[in-house]
Image: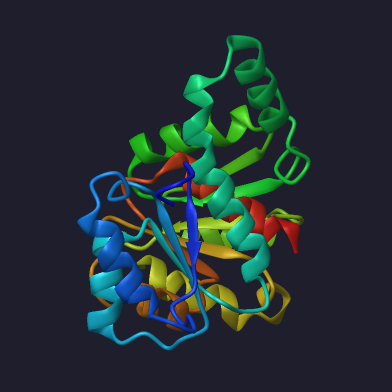
Amino acid sequence: MRATAFDCVVLDLKLPDMSGFDLIKEMQKDPALRALPIIVYTAADLTRSQETQLRRVAKSIIVKDVRSPERLLDEVTLFLHRVEANLPEPQRQLIESVRKNDPQLAGKRVLVVDDDIRNIFALTAVLERHGMQVYTAENGRDAIGLLDSTPGIDIVLMDVMMPELDGYETTRLIRQSGKYKNLPIISLTAKAMPGDREKSIESGSSDYISKPVNTDKLLSLLRVWLYR
């Protein structure tokens, strides 16, 4: 890394000569390496303190599982997008054109569930720019009703903080119906509080992202889940 400039590092924590934690510490000591994005790609079971320690320095933590190669590819792509600012304008336009015609997103039906109409407008604008067909609901009961009345929804973005029926309970109710057992549901929460991810997954969510939503990260998540 000192001899060659890199845009991103994918790091396993179990290395033969030193741990990934030790390598990160060494990188933090070097001003030239301190800002280099690190994606931790590990099969290790992390303790809460280890995860907190990594979150301070790593841009992303991916636990190896059946879909992790696709997730890893999207995460790396996400961080390499930063290099686009240095590309000539024609190449930047070409990349944007490819994204807008992304076959993994174009034509897919997404249900956005959020009680704040401003969030709905913001997400709808982003998703429609990528060719997605957007349906919206402002509460959990309307979301369940819309799913039942609209066949072919491909994925759901579920706000967890809603009055009366919150996103966790709405997700549980959706999962109770056998026909939705494989429907990807991504939880959106206002703050990345400790335990939020576990609570989301426990309720039946497929994945989790915190607000304010990072657009590129959201699109990466959508591609990962719609790719299956």
Q: How many marks?
A: 0
Q: Residue at x 64, y 32 (%)?
A: 130
Question: Could you tell me residue 109's position as x and y percent?
Answer: 69, 47
Q: Residue at x 53, y 26 (%)?
A: 84
Question: Could you tell me residue 167's position as x and y percent?
Answer: 40, 66
Q: Residue furthest top?
A: 89
Please state if 29 lies on the left or on the right of 228 as rendered: left
Question: Could you tell me residue 181's position as x and y percent?
Answer: 67, 78
Res. 228 visible in picture: yes
User: What colouring style does the render use?
Assistant: rainbow
Q: Is residue 28 above or below residue 16?
A: above
Q: Is residue 201 above or below residue 160?
A: below
Q: Residue furthest front?
A: 3
Q: Residue at x 66, y 71 (%)?
A: 67
Of the pair 81 and 145, the residue shown nearer to us: 81
Question: Could you tell me residue 135's position as x and y percent?
Answer: 59, 43
The quarter holding residue 219 reads top right
Please state if 21 lies on the left or on the right of 5 as rendered: left
Res. 164 visible in picture: no
Task: Locate the C terminus and report the quarter of the image it occupies.
Answer: bottom right
The quarter holding residue 224 reads bottom right
Of the pair 184 and 140, the residue shown nearer to us: 184
Q: Residue at x 34, y 60 (%)?
A: 58
Q: Is residue 138 above or below residue 120?
A: below
Of the pair 26 and 168, the residue shown nearer to us: 26
